[in-house]
Amino acid sequence: MAASPRGGARGAKTAKAAIPQLAWHEIRPAPVILLSGPEDFLADRASRLLRDALRDRDPSLEVHDLTADGYGPGELLTLASPSLFGEPRLIRVENVEKTTDAFLLEMIDYLESPADDVVVVLRHGGGVRGKRLLDAVRSGKGGAVEVVCSELKRDSDRAEFAAAEFRHAQRAIAPAALRSLVSAFTDDLAELAGACQQLLADTTGDITVETVTRYYGGRVETNAFAVADAAIAGDYGQALGLLRHALATGADPVPMVAAFAMKLRTMAKVGGSRGSGGQLAGSLGLAPWQIDRARRDLQGWNEEGLGRAILAVADADAQVKGAGRDPVYSLEMLVRMVAARGLPVG
C-alpha cells in the first residue's frame, strides 16, 4: 500500500482493498478511479492532475461531469459508448456518497466490463451510502485504483504538503519559514496551497522567515508562534513586545495560548528521546524538522520547569476562555513564566 503524509493512504480504513491505494499526487490513468476521503482540496488536485495527464497523452480528450445524487438512468452508458471519432473520455462523477440506486446499480454493472479508452472517476467523500459500490470497486473489478484523500490534521502532514509544493518547484524554503507558513494557515489546506503558490510566483531565490513574515505576518497564528518562540528562548522583552503588537493588531488570545501549548507539548514529547529526527519522526508523529527544532528549544530547560510551564498553559487556556476577567493579563503572566523557563514569577 502506498502511503503519503500529504494526504495518502496512511490512516485510511481500506486495508482490505484488493486494488492499489495511492496518494493524491500518485494518481494515474485506470479504467476506474475511486477518489475517497473527506479532503476535497486533495481530491480536486488529483482530478486535475489526471485530466492534464490524459490531455497530454491525447488533446482530443472529452471530459464529462455527472453527479451521482442527480443521476438519470443510462447516462453513464451513453457517455461511455464508443464515439464516432474514437476520442478518449474522462467521466467524473461527484457525490457518490449520496448516490441514487440507479447510479449504484449501473456502476456496479459497468465494473464487469469497462469501456475502452474511458476513465471513470468516482468521488466519494465518506459515509456509508454507496458502500456496496465501494466494496465492488475495492474488490478488484474493472481494474480500479483508489486515491485516498485523507484530511491533513497534523502539523507534520501540512508541513510535508507545503514542503512538497516548494520541492516540486525546485525552490528551497527555510525550516523556520516553513513552520511559520504552515502555522499561518491551520484551517484551510486550499489557503495554504495558495500561499505557497503566491510565494513561488512573487519571489525569487530561497524562501526565508523574513519573506513569509512580509507576506503573511498579519496572520494571527504566525504572530502567536513568534511570541511563543521568543518566550521559549528566554527573551521576555521581545516576547512581551510581540504579544502586545499582536493583540493591538487584532490577535485573539485563544490561538495565542494554543501556540504555546503546541510548542511546549512538542518539547515534552521530544525531551529525553534519542536518535535522529528522521529515525524518530514516525514514532513521535512529528516531522524531522519539528524534532530538531524542539531539541533546540529545550536548551536551557529542565523537566520540572517544562512541567510547570505546561500547567501554566492549561491555566491560561481556561482564563482566556472565560474563567478569568482579564485574558490579556493572563497571557502576559504566561509569557513571563515561559520566558523564565518555568520558574515561579512574583
Image: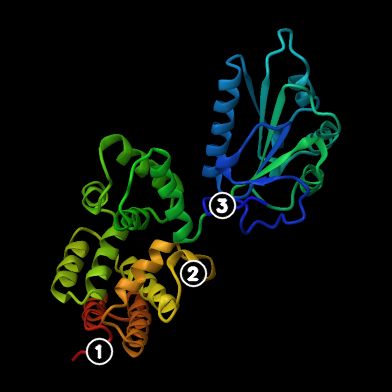
For residue 306, what is the image quadrant?
bottom left
Q: Is residue 225 left or right of residue 336?
A: right
Identify which amino acid the numbered label 3 is placed on: Ser
| Residue placed under numbered mark 3 in the picture | 4
Q: Which mark is residue 343?
A: 1
For the C terminus, the image quarter is: bottom left
Which mark lies nearer to you, 2 or 1? 2
Which mark lies nearer to you, 3 or 2? 2
Q: Earlier in the sequence, mark 2 or mark 1?
A: 2
Find the distance from the CA under tag 2 to the CA under tag 1: 30 Å
Residue found at x 52% / y 50%: 6
Which mark lies nearer to you, 1 or 3? 3
Is residue 59 shown above or below 229?
Answer: above
Q: Position of residue 116 (x, y in %)?
A: 77, 22
Find the distance from the CA under tag 1 to the CA under tag 3: 41 Å
**Along the line of sight, which residue is nearer the eye, 3 or 188?**
3
Question: Of all residues shown, which one is farthest toward the front?
Answer: 275
Q: Earlier in the sequence, mark 3 or mark 2?
A: 3
Q: Position of residue 257 (x, y in %)?
A: 33, 72
Q: Is residue 260 left or right of residue 148?
A: left
| Residue placed under numbered mark 2 in the picture | 280
Q: Earlier in the sequence, mark 1 or mark 3?
A: 3
